[in-house]
Amino acid sequence: MKKPFFATKSTFFGFILVVFASVFSPVLAAEEQEHEAEPFNASEVILHHVMDDHQWHFADWLVLPLPVIVYSEEQGLDIFSSSRFYDDHHQVVEYNGYKLEHNHIYLADSGKAVFDLSITKNVAMLFINAGLLLFVFLSVARGFQRNQGKAPKGLQSFFEPIILFVRDEIVKPNIGHHYEKYLPYMLTLFFFILFGNLLGLLPGAGNLTGNIAVTMTLAVFTFLITNFSGNKGYWGHIFWTPGVPLPLRIVILPVEIIGIFTKPFSLMIRLFVAITAGHIVLLSLICLTFIFGSILVGLGSSLIVLFINLIELLVAGIQAYVFTMFSSMYIGMAVADHGHDH
């Protein structure tokens, strides 16, 4: 009897983690003792992974420089490689009147911040995510056109059930008969978050959906669509709640107005915290291997990391589902017919 593909893949991934911990931990410890280097800084490694950067650091011997695009009134527009900020020993240096401090670029003379439009690690991940979405769903669309009236094949056979699930189980029940107008946005939202979550679990990948700027942008889109779609009944419930005594309306009004902003805020924080926390837990366990420099610790932490990584795969789907579901609920509340309340 053949083993399931998922179990085989999990076993292989666990084996790789164990080998990595067993082989490289003693080597790292030996190098630190030989060169009398500083102790391994786990917090620095973890923060370096979850935060954005002007270069893509895969390993000490594999760093991908990214384009720096900055503008200032003093020096105008400048475009150069982020590798210019580092010398041969990977120490930060000034370049062309600019300096890099805590991943922010300033003018070296005045210390004034510049307008930074650089292609950072998370921006590069954003392009990769968007490119993958276009490739996958253009292929699915072409497959749907070719196979009309036939059983789906290839990518279409995998993604079509997910698309139908999002439509029939998330969007349609929560928005109602107006759902078709918002379905393209909801599908884009769901798969953008899902792909971003899954790509972020790959070794060396950027923390795209764990970046609060990205989650804030998604939440702002939902906020704008919800409130621009709001009908008379929606705004009436906020500013003049029907069936409530006048003194109580004075109390309810500020609560309702605050609720307009707390809904997208909760969307932003929930996704940001869930993804970032998962990455921090995984990296913390991996760092135990290098802190103790022990094969047994490496083996134990690798097995735990394998288990948590499988949970993170589930969390990636859950967070995409939750964000899309609550967005659908908020829009559904804005476009619902409130005539029955009167």
Image (spheres, grey):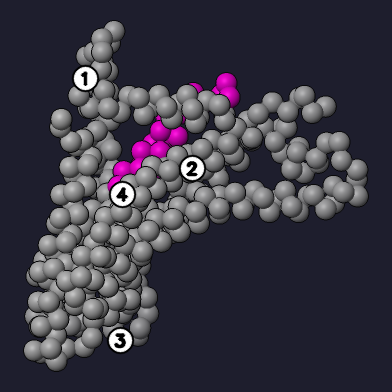
Q: Is residue 245 visible?
A: yes
Examine the structure image and report whether residue 181 is included in the region drawn in magenta.
yes
Of 104 and 312, the residue lying toward us = 312
Give me the residue at 57% from left, 30% from top: 174
Q: Which residues are magenta?
A: 176-198
Please tell me how crowded label 2 is: few (under 14), some (14-19), or many (20+) other residues with Cα within 10 Å: some
Give me the residue at 57% from left, 29% from top: 175
Of 228 and 122, the residue lying toward us = 122
Are the two marked residues, 1 and 4, in contact with CB atoms closer than 8 angstroms? no
Q: Amino acid at mark 2?
A: Val
Give me the residue at 16% from left, 61% from top: 18
On the rendered image, what quadrant is the N terminus found in? top left
Cα–Cα span, label 3 and label 2: 48 Å
Cα–Cα span, label 1 and label 4: 28 Å
On the rendered image, what quadrant is the C terminus found in? top right
Q: Could you say which disc has been placed on residue 310 in the image?
A: 4
Asked if 183 appears above or below 225 in the picture, the reply is above
Q: Measuring from the top left, give residue 139's x and y in whole percent.
A: 22, 27
Q: Could you say which disc has been placed on residue 135 in the image?
A: none
Q: Amino acid at mark 4?
A: Leu
Are the two marked residues, 4 and 2, in contact with CB atoms closer than 8 angstroms? no
Question: Which residue is disc 3 drawn over?
Answer: 109
Are the two marked residues, 3 and 1, in contact with CB atoms closer than 8 angstroms? no
Q: Amino acid at mark 1?
A: Lys
Please tell me how crowded label 1 is: few (under 14), some (14-19), or many (20+) other residues with Cα within 10 Å: some
Question: Which residue is disc 2 drawn over?
Answer: 322
Q: In front: mark 3 or mark 2?
A: 2
Q: Is residue 91 left or right of residue 186?
A: left
Counting residues from the start of the chain, the first of labels 3 and 1 encountered is: 3
Counting residues from the start of the chain, the first of labels 3 and 2 encountered is: 3
Majority secondary structure in the magenta region: helix
Question: Which residue is disc 1 drawn over?
Answer: 153
